Amino acid sequence: MTPLRVWDLPTRIFHWLFALAFAVAWTLGGEDDWLGWHSYFGYLAGGLIVFRLFWGFFGEELSLFRSFPIDPAGALRYLKNLPTNSGQHYLGHNPAGALAIYALLALGLATAVSGMALLGADKHLGPLAGLVASDWEDALEEVHEFCANAMLLVVFGHLAGVIAGSLLHRENLPRAMVTGFKPADISPQTPQPARLRAGVAAALLLAIAVFTANHDFSGGCDDNPMACENDEQAEGEEEARDHDRRHGKRKGRHDDD
């Protein structure tokens, strides 16, 4: 069989950057000392998901969502036939891999959005600062952690499928996602150059928009006027409550006298 380019460059860049962003963000999660880096890689993952959603409609043929539809029945058949290598061989994503991709995109998006909301509610940072009430902090933290851990389970399942597929189909799937080439006897359709260039340009603009809308996560209210305003208001309310409590105690002692 002749090596054919199956995965376009934007899809391959997304794949490895997304894997890196999630791995780092998950590893650093829960550590306040690393909140800045955790948030940065979380935003990177979110921006990459936005790009992939766009590329799923404007990329090359095997990167399009229509080339790997959601098919649970087909995924079960594929997994059932995988040990005997008797099932259909797919040039692009197989049905089980497709389910993993959609799950990772959905969970990744939910993790990124809940993380932005949590950052706004807890630290008054990010684009959602001032828009999410502090009362939602605990609920958002639960959602954020659940989605991140569920995503990790899907990643393990995806890695197991990649290893099994590589061994049973005698093809190096990780290498294919690096080089873009897989051995095959058919050629996938390719978009016209103008369409590809327009898609890449639009995707880059989306990524730039995500990053330029972001703040310095570790800079506190100095880099976020809304955070300053919220912090000052919270401090003022706390001082008022302390004053009322002290005044109440003094009044109580006078009454006793």
Image: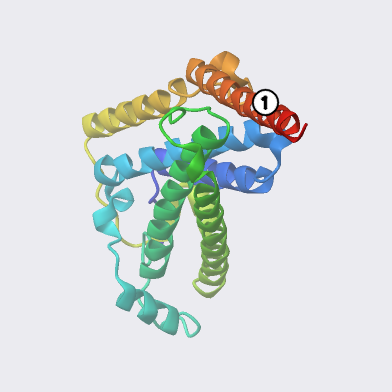
- Residue 44 is at least partly visible in this image: no
Residue 58 placed where, x, y %? 25, 40
Q: Residues within 10 Å of mark 1 (few under 14, many from 20)?
A: few
Question: Which residue is at 41% across, 52% downward?
Answer: 105
Q: How is the image coloured?
A: rainbow
Image quarter hosting the C terminus: top right
| Residue position marked by numbered label 1 in the rendering | 247
Q: Amino acid at mark 1?
A: His
Between 66 and 92, the one lying in front of the other is: 66
Residue 142 placed where, x, y %? 54, 54
Residue 83 placed where, x, y %? 50, 83
Q: Is residue 203 above or below residue 225?
A: below
Q: Secondary structure at mark 1?
A: helix
Between 181 and 173, the one lying in front of the other is: 173
Quarter of the rendering containing residue 130: top left
Left/right placement of residue 238 relative to residue 186 reads right
Residue reaching furthest front? 257
Question: Which residue is at 40% across, 69% downward?
Answer: 96
Q: Is residue 18 above or below residue 91?
A: above
Question: Which residue is at 41% across, 57% downward?
Answer: 101
Residue 154 placed where, x, y %? 51, 63
Question: Which residue is at 45% across, 37% downward?
Answer: 133
Image quarter hosting the N terminus: bottom left
Between 176 and 117, the one lying in front of the other is: 117
